[in-house]
Amino acid sequence: MMDAVKLAVIGVVLLVAGGVAVTTGALPVAEAAGIIERVWPILLFVVAVTITAELASTAGVFDVAASALARFGRGRTWSLWLLVVLLAVLATAFLSLDTTAVLLTPVVVVVARAHRLDPLPFAFTTVWLANTASLVLPVSNLTNLLAVHRLGGADTAFFVALLGPSALVAILVPVGILGLVHRRALRGRYEAAPPPRVEDRVLLVAASVIVLALLPLLVSGVAVWIPAVVASVVLGGFFVWRSPRTLRFALVPWQLLVFASGLFLAVGAVQALGSGAILDVVAGRGEDLISLWQLAAAGMVGANAIDNLPAYLALEPTAETPLRLAALLIGVNAGSLITPWASLATLLWHQRLVSVGVEVPWRRSMLLGVIAAPATVGLAVLPLAMR
């Protein structure tokens, strides 16, 4: 399984390959500069929102939220699971899929165990929705931010109007499948567990207020990296005051930063060498239902074969209209349910489960994904064809 060190090593290799491509002229300097200009705000946002989410988690925001859900569930397992679905959708939509996979997953596992429930239905809910609910807003996924840039900086309202119905389908289909598959584990009742211990109430309140203030700012039309950076700096200031030892270099997702930077350059070099003709055949053309399905399927297969980010970058040139770009996002985001490496979020999710002692039945998971991914992608494309 790809851990953080391996991810960083791959990123360094990709950076070196990209540097060689620039040096040899395979990737023109002007195109490399264009890639850097395009991605630096996106990567800055990813770093800032990750730091904010990590500090909020340390302050206990997610633990308290999950404990509150257990109380709101009133002892009904189905109710608790549906509330976890809601929390996973909200966390993914506003704080990105990696936040849901990395920070929310261990929280829901702890909550399930505290109430003597099977943690797997809750754990699979977080990872599936981390991927499929990442179609909700531009900030939900790195691929969305890249797509918004390609759309000329389209605002949140345009993105939601374009992908909103598809995002709803991409949430409801996997939720329905998970509910059906885990219906026995989700039956019955549970006894409410004591609320989690809060180490520093000042930090908890500060982190909660900052996160709640950040959410509307991310969809306000302001460049998303600005409120994310402000939130991380302000929350970091509270930690300097209350818990300075918490602030460490590991808070910065430098492995992801190196990996993404190298990937952008490497894919740019491959595209400059003329991969477009082959991908045009694979992804097709047109905006009719069959053509949109073809592009979405290509994105889904590419994501599960290599990873959703390189799959998006490779196929992006074939998505020359908003509808085709939306179909590609559906394929690479909602289709990343089969292989463990289909998205970075799934890899990080698995690491967190291992750290809390939960075994993942990969064979069963992949077989279920073979059913869920095509069904989710195929149905989510339908609203696009009906426009």
Image (cartoon, helix red, strand yellow):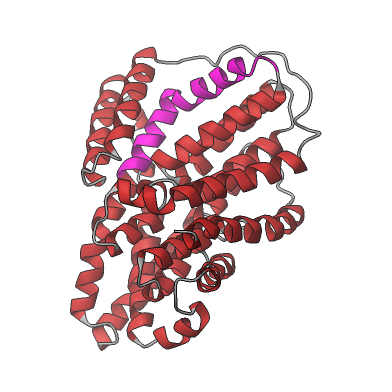
The percent position of residue 89, horizontal first and vertical second, equals 50, 38
Q: Which stretch appears magenta? A: 48-75
Q: Is residue 63 visible?
A: yes
272 falls in the magenta region: no
The residue located at (56%, 65%) in the rendering is: 300
Q: Is residue 21 left or right of residue 164?
A: left
Q: Is residue 338 visible?
A: no
Give the quadrant of the C terminus.
Answer: bottom left
Give the quadrant of the N terminus.
Answer: bottom right
The residue located at (50%, 52%) in the rendering is: 166
The percent position of residue 152, horizontal first and vertical second, equals 24, 61
Q: Is residue 241 left or right of residue 118?
A: left
The percent position of residue 359, horizontal first and vertical second, equals 72, 44
On screen, 277 above or below 67?
Answer: below
Quadrant of residue 324 in the image?
A: bottom left
- As drawn, which residue projects farthest toward the right? 184
Q: Nearer the viewer, residue 99 or 244?
A: 99
68 falls in the magenta region: yes
Q: Nearer the viewer, residue 133 or 51?
A: 133
Q: Main secondary structure of the magenta part?
A: helix
Quadrant of residue 71 in the image?
A: top right
On screen, 162 above or below 102?
Answer: below
The percent position of residue 346, horizontal first and vertical second, equals 56, 52
Q: Is residue 292 left or right of residue 15?
A: right
Circle count: 0
The residue located at (41%, 64%) in the rendering is: 323
